[in-house]
Image (tube, rainbow, N blue to C red):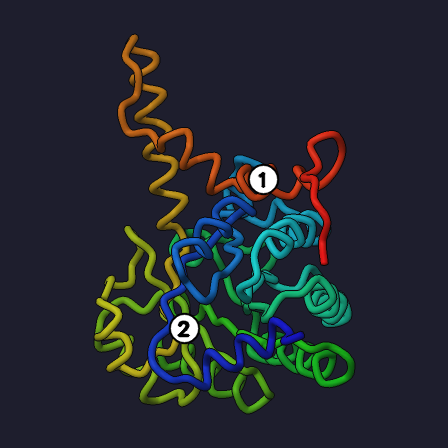
Amino acid sequence: MTTAPNQLRALLEQGGLISMPCCGDALSATLIEQAGFSLTFMSGFAAAAHRLGAPDTGLMSYAEVLDQGRNILEAVSIPVIGDGDTGYGNPLNLQRTLRGFAKAGFAAIMLEDQVAPKRCGHTRGKAVVEREEAFDRIRAAVEARDDDADILILARTDARALLGLNEAIERANRFRELGADMLFVEAPETREELATICREAPGIHIANMLEGGVTPILPPAELEALGYRIAAYPLTLLATAMQAMTEALDALKAGRHPQRLMAFPELRRRLGFEAYDATAADYGPNRATGSKA
């Protein structure tokens, strides 16, 4: 059976841009797969929102993140990239995190150079560690991967917002030299900066298309032309769902019934009731009769 890392490697070998809506729980991951997307990412922001109803400020523990990830991985067959934050401690903690993600079945793990507890890359209050500490994190991850873990490493830097684009590019280049499989320079502020990243830091790059963030939202074709391989949409589903739920609650509070609802038969189908009932009919008193050759 093809492993999740090999599925991701095959996708990357095909060339072109991969559009990657991000998930926070098993339901959003299931809908992404049902819509025909070939890859998703367990967003730390979305996972914290779904599991805790709280901000992405390092409140979720390693065990909680891994548990949330396992639920997602059990629900879908497409490869999933997991958000490993800063690794949950020193380089040895980070290696344990990477091995745990690999055993759970993630295709890749994202590791970043923020100071713990980390924050969303497009919010205030974040800080990054010194270069050597950032490099030690990726070095430790690569050693664990090469030793006994089948998983890709997505190395992220948040240095652009704090130390400038040149520092972010230098860090990304060093991450690649150390053995990272993919690169993620967070929060470039212009189209030219997006282009400069791919031009001056060769590698497999992810563009983070966060609505309301500091990075301009570019069409997939334009991102591909700039050199990006994956376009991540980290909060599109979460923001859409929260908007729809608050509108429905406002309507109910005002004595009206919400109008924008998924039809009950469609809801049942997407959640798997039809498949469940068909399988259940093979057992117990409702078992189908007849001989099988």
The front one of 94 and 279 is: 279
Q: Residue 119 appears at what percent x and percent y?
A: 50, 53
**Total marks placed:** 2
The residue sitting at 51% across, 40% down in the picture is 271
Please state, as top left, top right, bottom left or bottom right, where the C terminus lies in the image. Answer: bottom right
Circle 1: element type: helix
Place of residue 91 in the rendered image (x, y in percent of width and height, measured from the top left) = 72, 72
Q: Which residue is mark 1?
A: 51
Q: Residues within 10 Å of mark 2 (few under 14, many from 20)?
A: many
Q: Amino acid at mark 1?
A: Arg
The quarter of the picture where residue 108 lies is: bottom right
**First in residue order: circle 1 vs circle 2:** 1
Q: Quadrant of the N terminus?
A: bottom right
On screen, residue 16 versus residue 286, left or right, reads left
Mark 2 — residue? 206
- Figure quadrant of residue 158: bottom left
The answer to whether residue 167 is above or below residue 80 is below
122 and 255: which is toward the camera? 255
